[in-house]
Image (spheres, rainbow, N blue to C red):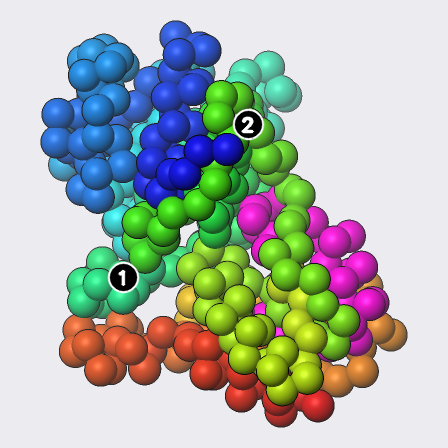
Amino acid sequence: MKQMTYAEAIRDGMRVEMHKDPNVYLQGEDVAQFGGCFGVTAGLYDEFGPTRVMNTPISEAVIVGSAVGAALAGLRPIAEIMFVDFMGCCMDELFNQAAKLRYMNGGKCKVPIVVRTPCGAGMGAAAQHSQCVESWFTHIPGVKTVMPSTPADAKGLMIAAIRDDNPVMYIEHKQLLPVPGDVPEGEYVVPLGKADIKRDGSDITIVAWSWMIQKALAAAEELAAKGINVEILDPRTLVPFDKDALLKSVAKTGKLLIVHEEVKTSGFGGEIAALVCEEGFDYLDAPIKRVTAPDTPIPFAPILEGAFIPSAEKIIKAVESMF
């Protein structure tokens, strides 16, 4: 094991695959000499050169659209969109092209694209640069959605995403980029669609992902002191979703709290709640609850932004209300 930050682990995953497969390349705004807006791609230009790490025009449609063409031609592009908030500018390329081409061609072509993009509030970047909108992508058949919460998962899921023959949305939370952790060296793969129990417990299941895992773990420590033993399940990938792991956990604990930074209405937590109601209702000893961001744009003012983001305190209050 080697200590890496979340950002370094993402970079290491890309580096491993770029050394292994000459068809893997990276493109996006300022990803080359500058190393990316958040420094995630730092050093890759010097290591692999201008034909493997390429700056693009400031056009999300160009970044993803050209990646679709490259993938159809046999390459394996990693396309960086500087903020997930800008994915609306290239949704046609993702939604109508990348997601559907393999299906519409009877499986005769592959579209192995990884779209990397950062999400999340907490940096004072206001309403247009701070959103979590992962449920947008989970609603598109043909697109896989990855949201790692630890450096090890960040590396393992990156390698799995690059090797997948389908479009993968790889969503990185900005607050996690400096977070350190143990990361296996060399080729390390975390399978898409395999959840992870981040904390074993018996009294209630909390399902969270990305930065919210950190909030849930902090809440669980305080709740343990109060005699409530929390199990924390990290799906790691929202599509494909590991429903067996979820149902097994809920069957053990009898209670389910879902935590996400997306706004509440139509957030992916609603899909998880529906799944448990449809396939595991008899396991429940209490109604399912959600802790989410409110249905508002993200404020710029630090105090208001702090109130917007789901907190450990809100998680604790929600858990206690279920007993």
* Residue sitting at x 21%, y 44%: 38
- Residue 80 % position (x, y): 29, 35
> Does the image show residue 122?
yes
- Give, as a single range, the part of the protein colored magenta: 234-259
- Residue 179 % position (x, y): 36, 51
Callout 2: helix, strand or loop? loop
Give residue 167's mark.
none
Is residue 261 rendered magenta in the image? no
What residue type is disc 1 on? Answer: Ser
Q: Which residue is mark 1?
A: 130
Q: Is residue 301 depicted above or below 250 in this figure?
A: below
* Residue sitting at x 18%, y 16%: 46
In which quadrant of the rendered image does the C terminus lie? bottom right
- Residue 263 % position (x, y): 42, 71
Give the number of the mark in front: 1 or 2: 2
Q: Nearer the viewer, residue 319 or 85?
A: 319
Residue 124 in the figure: left or right of residue 291: left
Mark 2 packing: few (<14 Cα in 10 Å), some, or many (20+)?
A: some
CA gap, disc 1 and disc 2 = 30 Å
Q: What is the quadrant of residue 65 in the picture? A: top left
Residue 278 in the figure: left or right of residue 127: right
Q: Residue furthest right?
A: 282
Callout 1: helix, strand or loop? loop
Residue 76 in the figure: left or right of residue 129: right
Q: Nearer the viewer, residue 11 or 241?
A: 11
Q: Which residue is mark 2?
A: 188
Q: Residue furthest top?
A: 22
* Residue sitting at x 32%, y 82%: 307
Q: Is residue 145 depicted above or below 294 in this figure?
A: above
> Does the image show residue 96?
no
Q: Nearer the viewer, residue 229 or 296?
A: 229
Q: What is the quadrant of residue 262 in the picture? A: bottom left
